[in-house]
Structure formats: C-alpha cells, structure tokens
Image (cartoon, rainbow, N blue to C red):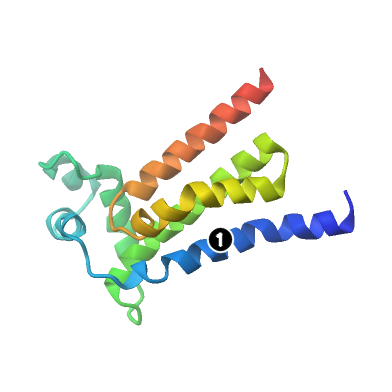
Amino acid sequence: MTAGEQARKRWVLPVLLLAALFFLRGALYRDLWFDEALTVLNFMLPLPDAWAVYRSYFIPNNQILYTIFLQNWHHLAPDWLPVELFWRLGSVGLALLTVSVLFLTFRKRLGSWLWGGVLAFYVASVPLAIYGTAVRGYMLSSLALALALAAGQSLCCRL
C-alpha cells in the first residue's frame, strides 16, 4: 500500500463522521417530539432504576433498554449544556457508532475504503438526520442491527 493510499485510508472515517455531524446540526436544537417527551417524563426521569423502568412500561412502542441508557446518560449531563441537547447527544453518539460499524462492514465487504464510506454515508444520511438526534431508541436498535450485520459478514467470510 502506497503512502497516499494510507493517508486516504486514515481520513475516510473522520470525514464521514464530520459529514454526519454537519447533517445533524439543525436537528440537535429542535423541540422534543411528543414521543420523546413521553419517554423522558413518564419513564426516564421519575423512575429510580432500571428495574423500575422495566416494570413500569405500559406503552409497547417505547424502548426499555434505551430508556435505561438514557437514565444513566442523564446523570453525566454537565451544568453548562442544556439537558435536552445532552440527551440528543447520546443518540448522536449511538448514531455515529452505527455509521462507523456500517462503514467498517461495507469497507471489508467491498475491499475499498472509499466505497465503504460512500455506501455507509448513503445508508445513514437521511435516517441519521431524523432519527440520529431523537431522544428515542432508534439508534440503539440501529446499532444492534449494524453489529449483527457485521457479525454475519464476519461469519460468512470465515465459512
């Protein structure tokens, strides 16, 4: 591998993540949606621990594991940052992990850093802008799916 190829290889993932943040910037400051507020006010804030979250869910479309994640994430919030923005940053972190896993999976499958990045960005761009900033479990579910895809890809390559 030439020095130029190595330099390009090192910059693909950071450029992909910066592009994702560029698409997310407007959505980070929107008001909470009804479902987001419901998750926070009915399940995340008033309940003391993970078991209480698990026992108290009466709405089947809410994500229990994400609410437990959010409960713990909330305790890390700094005083200088609006708490709603901090909650969204947890989803952004999960979204960026998802894009990273997709990138590495596609790169391995296609054998190309460039095409791996293009394909991961294409898959993630629109859903990421909408759901990657939601205070809901969409990105935790997407990350689990991306990890399953990566595991399947790895297993298939070994057979």
Q: Residue at x 62, y 63 (%)?
A: 15
Count of numbered marks: 1
Q: Residue at x 54, y 52 (%)?
A: 121
Q: Is residue 115 visible?
A: yes
Judge left or right: residue 92 versus residue 31: right
Kindly state the secondary structure of the residue where label 1 is placed: helix
Q: Quadrant of the C terminus?
A: top right
In the image, residue 63 lies at what x, y percent?
Answer: 25, 44
Q: Residue at x 49, y 68 (%)?
A: 22
- Indicate left or right for 119 with 26 as reference: right
Residue 67 screen position, x and y as percent: 26, 51
Residue located farthest toward the bottom when viewing the structure as drawn: 80
Q: Position of residue 126 (x, y in %)?
A: 42, 54
Q: Which residue is mark 1?
A: 17
Q: Residues within 10 Å of mark 1 (few under 14, many from 20)?
A: some
Query: Is residue 75 visible in the rendered structure shown here?
Result: no
- Seen as rendered, the residue at the extreme top is 159
Q: Residue type at mark 1: give it.
A: Leu
Camera-nearest residue between 25 and 78 = 25
Q: Residue at x 73, y 58 (%)?
A: 10
